[in-house]
């Protein structure tokens, strides 16, 4: 599965079975606010959101940014994968 950052639409996205899944974000200064994760109903349960979350978090790490997990799915992903807690912006916990 290929996951790309679509900077024009401000989201990470992947297309599976002609359906697009996304993680939307706002990038401001040294922070990336992950605001919404959406996977079409027909694709739920296949690990797509988790794969996209990992990709987004690795990109945040590579870019030297801090994470603001406004999306509940992203917050729960970081909670289940504590190796990403170091990315959390000051004042944010999961």
Image: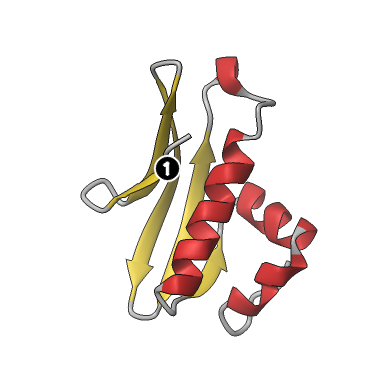
On the rendered image, what quadrant is the C terminus found in? bottom right
Indicate the position of residue 66 as horizontal and vertical percent values: 50, 76
Q: In this picture, is 61 found above or below 18?
A: below
Pick the residue in front: 64 or 35. Answer: 64
Indicate the position of residue 73 as horizontal and vertical percent values: 65, 47
Q: Count the marks: how many?
A: 1
Left or right position of 29 against 93: left
| The quadrant where residue 19 appears | top left
Indicate the position of residue 54 as horizontal and vertical percent values: 58, 54
- For the point 26% across and 46% down, the residue is 9
Q: Which element carries disc 1, helix, strand or loop?
A: loop
Q: In this picture, is 94 found above or below 21?
A: below
Q: In this picture, is 44 found above or below 71?
A: above
Of all residues, the one furthest to the bottom in this rendering is 90
Describe the colour scheme in one phrase: secondary structure
- For the point 48% across and 53% down, the residue is 35
Indicate the position of residue 90 as horizontal and vertical percent values: 59, 85
- For the point 42% across and 42% down, the residue is 3
Can I make out residue 88 in this image?
A: no
- For the point 59% across and 75% down, the residue is 87
**Pointer 1: what residue?**
3
């Amino acid at each position: 599965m290929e996951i790309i950052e679509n900077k024009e639409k401000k989201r990470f996205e992947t297309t599976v079975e002609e359906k697009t899944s996304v993680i939307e974000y706002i990038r401001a200064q040294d922070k990336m606010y992950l605001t919404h994760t959406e996977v079409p109903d027909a694709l739920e349960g296949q690990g797509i959101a988790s794969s996209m979350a990992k990709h987004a978090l690795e990109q945040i790490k590579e870019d030297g940014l801090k994470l603001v997990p406004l999306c509940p799915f992203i917050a729960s992903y970081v909670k289940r994968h504590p190796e990403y807690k170091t990315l959390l912006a000051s004042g944010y916990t999961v």
